[in-house]
């Protein structure tokens, strides 16, 4: 991808270590309960797959892009691999956070620009020239 990337922000090793920590935390919080992991939008595919493999609890997986609360779950907790606190336009209760990052355009590990870069094993910043930024 050469000149398209500005820098690696979070390495593949850092991602996998944090996935393991989040999986252990979720395993402990949901011990003895049924667990359904729901990925929202395509960008969650890498995180969901790695998280499910790192967990010790039996999990079910599903995908959707609509309101989860309307389905009346016994509990609902949000896990976000990345959170941009400086860009939040509304409060979302995120129980499990992988990394807080700055307000930069990032790609990789499921995140894309124009359907490209999802397959990168790390999270990097995209060079502004690629997306017309400054």
Image (cartoon, helix red, strand yellow):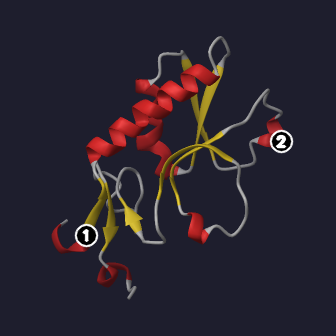
Percent x, y of residue 48: 48, 37
Q: What crowding class fits label 1: few (fewer than 14 Cα within 10 Å), some (14-19), or many (20 or more)? A: some
Quadrant containing the C terminus in the rendered view: bottom left
Q: In front here: 58 or 25?
A: 25
Q: Residue 70 carries which label?
A: 2
Q: In front here: 95 or 64?
A: 95
Q: What is the quadrant of residue 95 in the picture?
A: top right
SS of the residue under disc 2: helix
What residue is drawn where x is 43% and y is 72%?
104
SS of the residue under disc 1: strand
Q: Which mark is residue 17?
A: none
107 in relation to 36, above or below: below
Can residue 50 be seen?
A: no
Percent x, y of residue 63: 59, 39
Percent x, y of residue 122: 30, 52
Residue furthest toward the top? 32
- In three-dimensional space, the C-alpha distance between marks 1 and 2, rounded to whole angstroms, equals 40 Å
Whether label 1 touches label 2, CB < 8 Å: no
Quadrant containing the N terminus in the rendered view: bottom left
- Closer to the chain start, of discs 1 and 2, is 1
What residue is drawn where x is 42% and y is 36%?
19
Can residue 111 be seen?
A: yes
What residue is drawn where x is 34% and y is 38%?
16
Horizontal placement of 125 versus 57: left or right?
A: left
Percent x, y of residue 26: 57, 27
Q: Tell me the mark number nearer the camera, choosing from 1 and 2.
A: 1
List the residue tagged with mark 1.
5
91 in relation to 94, above or below: below
39 in relation to 4, above or below: above
Horizontal placement of 120 versus 62: left or right?
A: left
What residue is drawn where x is 49% and y is 25%?
24
């Amino acid at each position: 991808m050469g000149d398209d990337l500005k820098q690696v922000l979070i390495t593949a090793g850092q991602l996998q270590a944090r996935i393991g920590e989040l999986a252990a935390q979720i395993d402990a919080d949901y011990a003895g309960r049924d667990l359904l992991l729901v990925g929202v939008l395509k960008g969650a595919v890498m995180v969901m797959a790695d998280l499910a493999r790192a967990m010790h609890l039996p999990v079910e997986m599903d995908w959707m892009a609509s309101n989860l609360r309307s389905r009346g779950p016994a509990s609902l907790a949000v896990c976000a691999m990345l959170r941009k606190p400086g860009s939040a336009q509304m409060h979302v209760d995120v129980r499990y956070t992988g990394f807080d990052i700055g307000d930069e355009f990032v790609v990789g590990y499921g995140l894309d620009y124009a359907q490209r870069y999802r397959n990168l094993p790390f999270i990097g910043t995209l060079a502004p020239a690629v997306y017309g930024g400054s």
